[in-house]
Amino acid sequence: MVILENMSLQKKLEILSDAAKYDVACTSSGVDRKGSGSGMGNSLACGICHSFSADGRCISLLKVLFTNECIFDCKYCGNRSSNDIVRASFTPVELCELTMEFYRRNYIEGLFLSSGILISPNHTMELILETLYLLRVVYRFSGYIHCKAIPGADPGMIELLGWYTDRMSINLEFPTAESLRELAPHKNRKNILKPIRQIQLRRENSGIFPEITDKTAIMKSKAPVKDNDIAEIIASGGSLVPYAVESSGRRRFVPAGQSTQMIIGATKESDLQIMTVSEALYDNFRLKRVFYSAFINVNNDSRLPSTEAGPPLLREHRLYQADWLLRFYGFRTTELLDEKSPNFNVFLDPKCDWALRHLERFPVEVNKADYYTLLRVPGIGTNSAQRIVSARKSAILDFQDLKRLGVVLKRAVYFITCKGRMMYPIKVEEDFITRQLLDMGEKLPFGVDKDITYKQLSLFDDMNFVAAQKGYQSLAGCL
C-alpha cells in the first residue's frame, strides 16, 4: 500500500474521483425540490445529465468515493485490499466544502457519494452519515444527493441515511449469488438484498417523517461537527433530523427511489439471466433503475475475462434497450429471450428483433391500433404513441403526419399501415425486412465501434475529443 502523508485536498480529489469512475449513476435526478431560501441549491426531476466522457458516460455530479481504502478483496475492483495503490480518505468537512464550492461555481448539480469499506461497514456509514448531516443541516445544501449505502451496516443507519439523500443504491454486483461468492467472497447476497427490501418497505409504508418536535431540534450552528458527534447522536436514540422538506412541511424518505448496478461480462450469466433478475427487482423491490456496467479488467487478473479488445459496451447497450422495454413498453423478459435464444441479437435492437419474430402481429393500422399495440411497433416510442392516439381523435393520419409526430419511419414503415395501405410495396417477410434494417444500419453508442480510451473525464481534464465525420463539437472540460 502506498501512503502519502499531508496529502492536499486536490490530490485527494484526483484519487477519489478517479476511483469512483466505474459506478454508474448519472441520469435524471427524479425529484423536484425548490430551494428553501435559507440555504443553497434545489433539485429538478429533469436535471442532471449534461456532459459525457470519452466512453459515452454522462458526468454531471461530483462523483467521488469517501475513501478508497477497503477491507474487502473483490477480484474485479481496483480498490481491493490486495492492490498496491495510493489510498486516500476525505473528512466529512472536506467533502462538504468541496461540494459547496463546486456547486457555487456551477460545476455540478449535486453529489454522488460511494465508498470503500473503512474498518467496518458501520464505521464507514457513520462517516457518510456525518457528511450528509453536515451538508443538509449545517451547510443547508438542498441540491441533489445520490448515496450508496453500505451492505452489512446497521439497519438504523440505513434508515437515517434515507432521510438525507434523494436517491439511495446498493450494488447487487452480479446477477447470481454464485458469481458474487466467486468474485466477492467477503460479500453475500443476503446483506445486499436486506437493505434494498428495507428501503422499499420504508418508502411504501409511511415514507413521510412526522412533524418536527422539540426532541429533534435542528443543529443550526455552522461550527464543524466533531468526529464522534454522529455516533453519539445515533447512540442517544437517533435524533438526527431528516432534511428533505416538502412544501407540506413533512419529510420524505428517499424521494427519488433506489437503484442498483450489475457488472456485465465478468461472469458467464446470459442476457436472459440478467434481465430475469432485473425484472424481479422491478417487480418485487420497486427499484427505479437497474444500471449495467460493462466489465473492465482493471486489475489485469488472469482469473477474470480479458478486456484487451475493449469492454462489452454493445452488450451493455442491448441490455439498456431491453431494460427500457420492460419499464416503459410493457414487455416481459420471456417475450424478448428464451432458453433457445438466451442472448440478444448483436445486429438488431431487442424491439426490432422481437417484431421480426412476431410478424403475424403486423402490419398494424395506426388509425385504429390501441396505445399498447402501437408501443410494440419499431420506430414508435412512448411520446409518439401518445401523440398518435391524441391526434387521430380529430383527423385520419397519413405517413407525413406520423413523421411530424416523431415516428421513425425508416423502421416503422415495415410494420404499419395508414388508411389500410403501407407506405411502399413491402414484403412482410422476416428475411426481407431484416436485410433492409441491416442495410439501414443502426446508430450504436458513441465509441462502440471505434478505438477509444476508457478514461472518465475528471474535474481536472481538458480533453478535445472530436468526431469529425459526425460533426460533433469538441468536448472541453467535464463539467
Image (tube, rainbow, N blue to C red):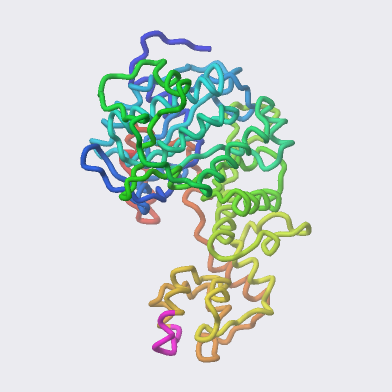
Along the horizontal axis of the image, is 61 left or right of 357? Answer: left
One can see residue 474 in this view: no
Q: Main secondary structure of the magenta part?
A: loop
Q: As displayed, is residue 254 above or below residue 19? A: below
Residue at left offset 58%, top offset 78%? 415
Along the horizontal axis of the image, is 199 left or right of 253? Answer: right
Along the horizontal axis of the image, is 74 left or right of 113? Answer: right
Q: In front: 280, or 446?
A: 280
Q: Is residue 393 magenta?
A: yes
Q: In front: 344, or 307?
A: 344
Pinpoint residue 259: horizontal percent, then vertical percent: 52, 44
Q: Point out the residue furthest to the top here.
A: 5
Pinpoint residue 241: horizontal percent, then vertical percent: 38, 32
Residue at left offset 45%, top offset 86%? 398
Q: In front: 423, or 41?
A: 41
One can see residue 200 in this view: yes
Q: What stretch is highlighted in magenta?
A: 390-399
Along the horizontal axis of the image, is 451 left or right of 13? Answer: right
Pinpoint residue 383: horizontal percent, then vertical percent: 44, 69
Residue at left offset 39%, top offset 38%? 145
Q: As displayed, is residue 277 above or below residue 217? A: below
Pinpoint residue 211: horizontal percent, then vertical percent: 36, 41
